[in-house]
Amino acid sequence: MTVMLGVNLTGRDVLLVGGGAVAAKRLRRFLAEGASVRIVAPALHEDTVRLVESHGVAWQGREFRAADLAGAWLVHTATGDVHVDRAVGEQCELQRVLCINASDGAHGSARLTAQAEVGDVTVAVTSTVGADPRRSMAVRDAIIALVGDGRLPLRRRRGAHSGRVDLVGGGPGPADLMTVRARRLIAEADVLVTDRLGPAAEIVQGLDPDVEVIDVGKQPGRHPVPQEEINRIIVERAAAGLRVVRLKGGDPFVFGRGGEEMLACLAAGVPVDVTPGITSAIAVPQSAGIPVTHRGTAAAFHVVNGQGGLGPGTLEAMADATVTTVVLMGVAALGRLVESAIAHGVPKDRPVAFVESGHTPQQRTTRTTLGRAVEDALAVGLRNPAVIVIGEVASERLLLPSPSTIGAALA
Ligand code: SAH
């Protein structure tokens, strides 16, 4: 029978008997747990020597004696000699100290688990009968993977935790383009504050019914929730002890007002963290086969907010044929953008691509040029959300293999 205990070893006296490679591994683990470790061993493995020196571990260079157990909360024996390990175990039994026996397949009076931490949860696996560390690790890793994907019910049921806000990037749309961390944080959240963009719809489906979902995004016929109100919502919920995820399309720090939300949390003394996401500035052009940089074609890219018009720096860059300009939120302002670019001397035949609803089944790409962009946008009925790419990389021919490269590949 085994009872798994979560034991806190911080500052506690742990005795390691034996100085070989196994002991070195365990020493590392006990030190990481903050234990105060002593070693008794006639000789030390080179890894152990290094750890002993760097961590100031006390080492007795001799055989084990029963008196070594004095003061120990826990003993680990790995001498490489089954008889010695057994004798250590017997002494521990007499003196009522728990003992992990590395050479005993049936375990000593205590055993280590295959352990890992995800978020604020510890997963530990061990075998009921006979040690099988490799299996334990495989099971642990499988559980960790499920937890990481947000597929296990990780939400706390007891409010012992203090509230916090996570500003989470959701990527350009599909749920499988979110990060593993984003999935986990969402699975842990009490409150999810979302926008229209990003993977929100799919994610919301899978949430517990008691998770509060607040949609603050723009919707046809409805005013968006003002930024101050969003700040107030996330800060208030977190201050009340809830885990808040503010899920945003793309990356929170790319035209996502993530910086403002972060400031609001910091000002209120609410713990806040940011989880990056795949930004549409790169991923949406990519979905249409457009690399924002390309060796020999584009050496830099500018990401701009079309609503704000184009500043002198952006226009200067746009005139440079080796710079790609990626315009977000540019549909309504397209006419004005094109006009100022042409007035600034950007050639009218500069390639332009409109990529609408990138990474969704509704994705559509329109190729045009600066000179024809407005006309073609009208002709196709260009709609939000769309990314406008201006630059040589937007040319349809860019990633088409030339006859010479096809020949080279076949040769
Ligand atoms: N933080 C986001 C950008 C927010 S601004 C990010 O990093 O991606 C919103 C703009 O992003 C939209 O107006 C549009 O230009 C662009 N956008 C976001 N998702 C898109 C998608 N799936 N397809 C096309 N454009 C998208």
Image (spheres, helix red, strand yellow):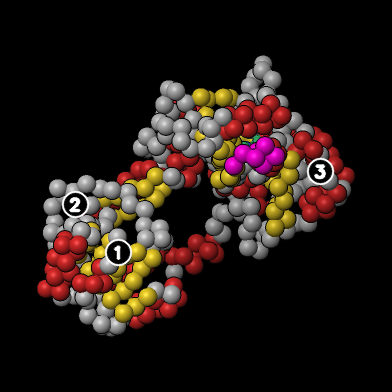
> Height in image: 409 above or below 175?
below
Disc 2 is placed on an element classified as loop
Q: Amino acid at mark 1?
A: Ala
Residue 387 at least partly seen: no
Instruction: Name the residue at 36% across, 53% down.
Output: 8
> Height in image: 78 above or below 341?
below
Q: Which residue is mark 2?
A: 127
- Residue 396 in percent (x, y) is at 62, 48
Q: CA distance from mark 1 to mark 2?
A: 25 Å
Depth check, mark 1 against mark 2: the one in front is 1
Asked whether 186 or 45 is in front, the reply is 45
Q: Which residue is mark 1?
A: 72
Q: Amino acid at mark 2?
A: Ser
Asked whether 331 or 231 is in front, the reply is 231
**View quadrant of ligand 1:** top right
- Residue 13 in percent (x, y) is at 34, 64
